[in-house]
Amino acid sequence: MKLESTKVSLDKSAQEVFNFLTNVENFEPLMPENISKFELMDAETFLFALSGMPEIVLKKKSMESPHTIVLGAAGGKLDFSLTAKIESVSETKSEVQLMFEGDFNAMMAMMIKAPISKFIETLALNIPKEI
């Protein structure tokens, strides 16, 4: 299953956006209002839970400055990744798009598609508000 957020424009350089998103602590203010838990586990990993959903642990998997940050599931039964693609528009402007990719059976995919789509959309739309 592959899902994409809309692209959001920022009045920040690609490097500034990359630096913000590589600090996992900065994901807390990006979370939706229905977050019930956010916990830093270390400099690379955080745990969060949305109301009515199980806890999810995300860990930085790879980075390519200043264009790509990949977070992946750390443990648990589900294997997926959340990728931030940062495009430089000019020296002071950039665009960000979030992509979710996971390998799920048809039943699971059907159940999580809408909440995950809404989740990555909320994260993306909150990025310009927080940087």
Image: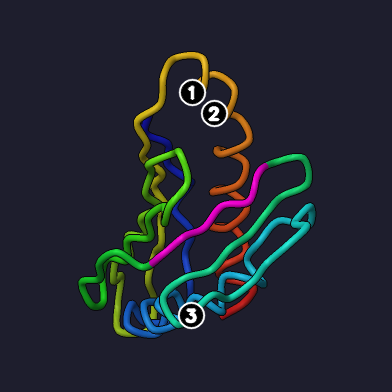
Q: Residue at x 57, y 29 (%)?
A: 112
| Residue 93: numbered disc | none
Q: Which residues are the magenta region?
A: 54-59
In the picture of the structure, the residue carrying the numbered disc 1 is: 109
For the C terminus, the image quarter is bottom right
53 displayed left or right of 61: right
Q: Residue at x 54, y 75 (%)?
A: 41
Task: Specify whether residue 123 is painted magenta.
Answer: no
Residue 90 versus residue 32 in the image, above or below: below
Question: What percent of the width, then of the height, locates residue 68?
Answer: 27, 65
Q: Would you call the spot at circle 1 few (<14 residues within 10 Å), some (14-19), or many (20 or more)? A: some
Task: Tell me the distance, in whole angstroms, between the alpha carbons under discs 2 and 1.
Answer: 6 Å
Q: Residue at x 65, y 44 (%)?
A: 54
22 or 104, nearer to the observer = 104
Q: Magenta-highlighted stretch: main secondary structure?
A: strand
10 or 38, nearer to the observer = 38
29 displayed left or right of 8: right
Q: Would you call the spot at circle 2 few (<14 residues within 10 Å), some (14-19), or many (20 or more)? A: some
Instruction: From the image, state whether disc 3 or disc 1 is nearer to you.
Output: 3
Q: Farthest left residue?
A: 64
Question: What percent of the width, then of the height, locates residue 24?
Answer: 49, 75
Task: Tell me the distance, in whole angstroms, between the alpha carbons under discs 3 and 1.
Answer: 30 Å
Give whichever of discs 3 and 1 has the lower sequence position. Answer: 3
Which amino acid lies under the numbered mark 3 shown in the image of this protein? Asp
| Residue 113: numbered disc | 2
